[in-house]
Amino acid sequence: MNTKIIKALAKINLAIDVKSKREDGYHNIDMVSVPLKLHDILEITKLGKDYDTYLLCDDPTIICDENNLVYKAFNLLKSEYTIEGEYRIFLYKKIPVEAGLGGGSADAAAVLLALKEHIKNIDEHKFLKEASDIGADIPFCLYNRAARVEGKGEFITPIKIQFPYHVLIVKPQQGLETKQVYEAFDFIKEDIPHPNISKLIFALEKDDEEMMKQSMFNVLSVPAIKVLPVIGELLEEMEMMNLHLNGMSGTGSACFALSKNKEHLEKASKIFEKQGYQTYITQFVI
């Protein structure tokens, strides 16, 4: 059997601004996204003609039906590009779910990347548009480099980051659904300040931590904290630990702290673990 192993990288959003709601139900966003070394692994094996494609996962909480983004990605390739054959896709999960770390999108992007090479003369623009219709984070996960991401997620501009920061991920036991957070945002958006995305990009290029701190704001953290107050408590605790480069990723519930001092993050990680949080130490991929 022909088996391919591919990594699906998590991501964090260092800042998110939400511009407007679109007619298709999505929102126009402007954000800075960075891939991480934290990753899932997909094992993709081509099967004989007597089989159907199926998805398995080592995490029993993951529902492996056709609503899973991995299935949707495969069905896109099958219907639009006539990928031949059937496949067994085994997903080894490490990225926490309902965390704002793009795990589902990364897994779907990994399938698209693994099987895309069988497609001749592919229209990249059309391909990205179709991928974004499955999930707004998928185009970035296909790109897998630090970038400014705009539109609903399909417009990607590469950025330079001077230093590959170590990252502490801390996730509460409770997760948050994207739809739930955006609905809360639409209700209170007039009262939320907006980050300066261009200033943050400049700060990352110059490795100016003070300017980074001023610019790292996620507008979705405001409604997320209203829905799940423990997120606010977690960010306050990071501040008290002198982890000032912190924030909430995506629509939460995971929060992060950046540091050049990995030992500082490891000590903080142990404290958060004792409090019942899930923690991960990882690093920028730049």
Image (cartoon, grey):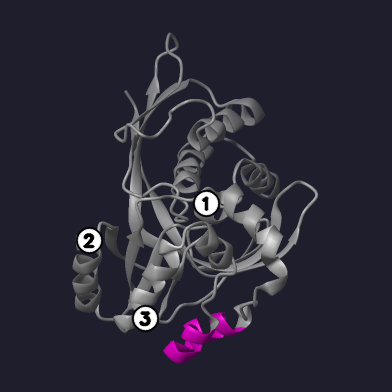
Main secondary structure type of the part rendered in magenta: helix
Dot 1: element: helix
Residue 95 visible (yes or no): yes
Label 3 neighbourhood size at 10 Å, few (<14), some (14-19), many (20+)?
some
Quadrant of the rendered image containing residue 48: top left
The image's mark for residue 273 is 2
Q: Are the two marked residues, 3 and 2, in contact with CB atoms closer than 8 angstroms?
A: no
Dot 2: element: helix
Q: Residue sitting at 40 percent across and 54 percent down?
A: 9
The image's mark for residue 192 is none
Mark with earlier residue (1, 2): 1
The residue pinned by badge 1 equals 142
Horizontal side of 215 relative to 273 (left or right) equals: right
CA distance for labels 3 and 2: 17 Å
Magenta-drawn stretch contains 76: no
Magenta-drawn stretch contains 213: yes
Stretch in magenta: 199-214
Quadrant occupied by the N terminus: top left
The residue pinned by badge 3 equals 239
Residue type, mark 3 in image: Glu
Q: Position of residue 221 (x, y in %)?
A: 53, 66
Residue type, mark 2 in image: Glu
